[in-house]
């Protein structure tokens, strides 16, 4: 799967979770860039991404991912 | 050994002197020896040695087995089980006995279990959780186990953090803890100022507040009305100055050594919601619970199933929230229980906090709509001030239970509030409850200083701002701080430096 396609599908998940159709994530997007992305919503996002790409993050990755770029790297390595 | 005593100061000076004199490769051994002296100071018994050795050996062997074995989960659970079992045995036996006695009472039995006194080592609540997170991190592949058992012993018992935290993570502290450190003047200057500020918070503010609060709480049948209100409003400040003051001393010592510790407070009383307050209060405990309990629980198949069922039944928005609230409730009960083996802790620092956060989250859309209809602006100073005051009042209310010791005491305190007489505030009677007029004045001025420093802290390090000033002003501030601790610090007959609020946890 190409990176562009991953970002496209990620955008879909982000928009669905945060109820905001204007969200466009990039490599450097972090939780500071999206208003509702707090520690409570983080896990819902993670689970939704796991379902979208049919893969699993391990707990260490869940707690240490710094931005969407790192998230995408993990997704690429798993699918 | 209490952080504000002379013996602790001497202990630190000797430790630091030896630490910077010995060859750098054995510096960590000095810390290890100091930490074990600190750990067993005044409490060296076969029981306490067994406690420390059990936790250390359990962690050591579990960590190696988790890394090497194919049954990682089994050894992780075994390790956590032993550490947690010991913690529960040491801290919560009486909580269970109270519950059993309640049940026996309901069954009309005259038999009652008598309470037991456990001689637990200082800091057991801290290093138990620190060691559990160490094992989980190895299980998750985030770190490699420490093969030197003495180095692991130092990680477990690093002396500054044994009294009040903060919670440390192995991967964050490893290189600093075992690393080689040169003496650095700038670091020492900065660390010493932080220690002084911590002493000011504890000795000048917290202890002084304690005189009043303890008098009112100790005589609930005598003091009511204005006394109760003031005692209730003072308590969060007492707790904060005591706890964050201890953290300042701990961080200051570590800074001098060259070990960076995570911050535990970030001006919590400027928070506009209780949710925000808990992001700024005991930050490392919150982060610990988030990473090791909340996330795994939320991500578990069980919670995912509940989420799915709820989404089908109640729709996406509400369905998503129900498992979240369930996990949060469990987490808040655990936070309450961590604070101590009393139901009042579970109510005050657990369930009530959860209720406030739950209400904030569910009522926020409604209050936003109401404000919009009524034309109330939310981004103006007056509204923010209202939010800050409201948050402080809610927190103070919950903390009544935290302080009470028993539910009946908490209820007496709350009913006392309604026996209010205005005359108390004008006829000088208020100065009869442990704090006379001059002590009240010192308190008000020192609280104002605290407020100013907190305000300055919001725009960056206060110490950096101080170091940027000219030498005369800089030293004037430092001298004022030193002399106010010496002159206004509470060392009087009523002063018992062993009563650190957070130490018991």
Image: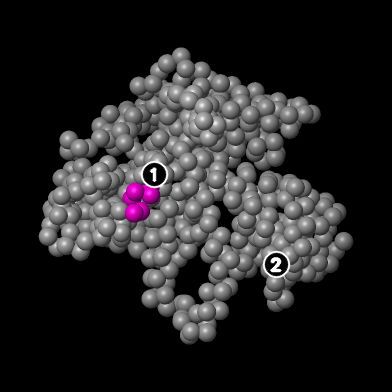
Q: Is residue B464 magenta?
A: no
Residue at screen point 39% across, 40% down: B405
Tell me the element at label 2: helix
Magenta span of residues: B410-415
**Residue under disc 1 on the same chain as residue under disc 2:** yes
| Crowd around label 1: few <14 · some 14–19 · many ≥20 (10 Å) | few
Q: Nearer the viewer, residue B179 or B139?
A: B139
| Mark pair 1, 2: CA separation | 40 Å
Vertical order, A6 against A22 (above or below): above
| Quarter of the rendering occupied by the N terminus of chain B | top left
Q: Position of residue B73 (x, y in %)?
A: 73, 33
Tell me the SS state at disc 1.
Answer: helix
Residue that carries the numbered disc 1 in the rendered image: B408
Crowding at label 2, few (<14), some or many (≥20) Cα neighbours within 10 Å?
few
* Closer to us: A19 or A53: A19
Look at mark 2 in the image and give the residue it sits on.
Answer: B317
Give the residue furthest to the front.
B108
Q: Visible in this render: residue B360?
A: yes
């Amino acid at each position: 799967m190409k990176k562009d396609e991953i970002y496209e599908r990620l955008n879909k998940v982000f928009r669905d979770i945060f109820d905001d159709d204007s969200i466009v994530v990039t490599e450097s997007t972090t939780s500071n860039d999206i208003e509702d992305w707090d520690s409570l919503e983080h896990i819902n996002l993670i689970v939704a991404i796991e379902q979208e790409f049919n893969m699993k993050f391990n707990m260490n990755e869940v707690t240490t991912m710094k931005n969407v770029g790192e998230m995408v790297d993990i997704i690429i390595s798993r699918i | 050994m209490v952080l504000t005593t002379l013996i602790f100061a001497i202990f630190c000076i000797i430790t630091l002197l030896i630490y910077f004199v010995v060859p750098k490769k054995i510096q960590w051994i000095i810390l290890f020896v100091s930490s074990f002296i600190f750990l067993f100071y005044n409490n060296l018994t076969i029981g306490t040695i067994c406690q420390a050795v059990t936790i250390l050996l359990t962690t050591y062997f579990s960590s190696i087995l988790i890394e090497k074995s194919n049954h990682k989960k089994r050894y992780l659970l075994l390790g956590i089980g032993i550490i947690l079992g010991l913690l529960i045995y040491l801290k919560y036996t009486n909580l269970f006995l109270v519950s059993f006695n309640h049940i026996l009472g309901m069954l009309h039995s005259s038999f009652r279990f008598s309470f037991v006194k456990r001689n637990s080592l200082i800091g057991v609540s801290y290093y138990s959780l620190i060691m559990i997170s160490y094992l989980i991190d190895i299980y998750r592949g985030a770190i490699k186990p420490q093969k030197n058992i003495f180095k692991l012993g130092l990680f477990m018992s690093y002396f500054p953090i044994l009294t009040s935290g903060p919670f440390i993570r192995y991967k964050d502290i490893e290189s600093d803890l075992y690393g080689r450190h040169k003496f650095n003047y700038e670091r020492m200057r900065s660390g010493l100022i932080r220690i002084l500020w911590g002493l000011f918070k504890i000795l000048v503010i917290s202890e002084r507040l304690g005189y009043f609060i303890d008098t009112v709480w100790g005589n609930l049948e005598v003091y009511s009305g204005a006394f109760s209100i003031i005692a209730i409003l003072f308590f969060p400040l007492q707790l904060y100055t005591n706890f964050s003051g201890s953290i300042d001393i701990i961080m200051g010592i570590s800074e001098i050594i060259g070990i960076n510790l995570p911050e535990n407070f970030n001006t919590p009383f400027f928070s506009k919601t209780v949710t925000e307050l808990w992001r700024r209060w005991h930050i490392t405990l919150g982060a610990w619970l988030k990473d090791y309990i909340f996330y795994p629980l939320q991500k578990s198949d069980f919670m995912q199933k509940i989420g799915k069922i709820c989404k089908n039944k109640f729709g996406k928005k509400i369905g998503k929230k129900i498992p979240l609230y369930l996990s949060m409730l469990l987490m808040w009960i655990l936070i309450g229980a961590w604070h101590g083996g009393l139901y009042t802790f579970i109510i005050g620092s657990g369930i009530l906090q959860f209720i406030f956060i739950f209400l904030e989250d569910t009522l926020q859309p409604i209050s936003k709509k109401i404000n919009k209809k009524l034309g109330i602006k939310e981004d103006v100073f007056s509204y923010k001030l209202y939010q800050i005051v409201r948050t402080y009042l809610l927190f103070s209310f919950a903390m009544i239970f935290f302080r009470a010791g028993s539910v009946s005491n908490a209820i007496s305190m709350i009913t006392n509030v309604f026996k209010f007489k205005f005359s108390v505030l004008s006829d000088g009677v208020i100065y009869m409850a442990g704090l006379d007029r001059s002590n009240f004045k010192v308190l008000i001025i020192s609280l104002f200083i605290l407020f100013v420093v907190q305000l300055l802290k919001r725009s960056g390090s206060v110490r950096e701002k101080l170091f940027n000033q000219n030498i005369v002003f800089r030293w004037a501030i430092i001298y004022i701080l030193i002399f106010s601790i010496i002159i206004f610090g509470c060392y009087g007959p009523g002063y018992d430096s062993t009563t650190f609020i957070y130490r018991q946890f």
